[in-house]
Image: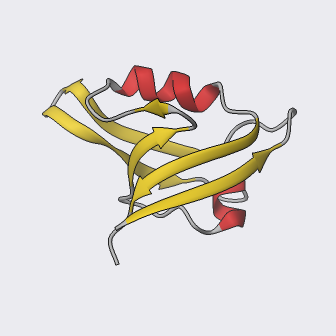
Amino acid sequence: RLKEIDLHIQPDSPGLGISIVGGSGSPNGDLPVIIKRVLPKSLAEEDGRLKLGDELIAVNDTLLVGMSKDFAINALSNMHGDARLLVLQEY
């Protein structure tokens, strides 16, 4: 099920506090970009909507499907202010 998550990221924030795996060209082949870890006391953990195993589909208007992990990291690193994530989440 697709889920849109809106977050407000403070300018001095160190980021969402997630680590990701997968992406095109990963050591295990072309895979979706997946949340591997939600860091303790991070914005993602405090918000509570992002979960381990969620597939990141888009960051703001940047589509992550078929992109590399480095591309996804860059898109996540450039998030600030009002940010929008589109995730595929299992229920």
Residue 38 in picture, x, y percent from top left: 54, 55
Image quadrant occupied by the C terminus: bottom left
Picture quadrant of residue 44: bottom right
**Side (left or right) of 2 relative to 49:** left
Residue 42 seen: no
Residue that lies at the very extreme toward the left in this rendered image: 29
Residue that lies at the very extreme toward the front in this rendered image: 61
In the rendered image of this protein, does residue 74 appear above or below residue 48? above
Residue 24 in picture, x, y percent from top left: 23, 26
Picture quadrant of residue 64: top left
**Side (left or right) of 72 relative to 16:** left
Residue 87 in picture, x, y percent from top left: 43, 54
Residue that lies at the very extreme toward the bottom in this rendered image: 91
Residue for point 32% across, 23% down: 68
Residue for point 55% across, 48% down: 85
Between 18 and 79, the one nearer to me in the picture:
79
Residue for point 53% across, 33% down: 61
In the rendered image of this protein, does residue 25 appear above or below residue 41? above
**Side (left or right) of 2 relative to 11:** left
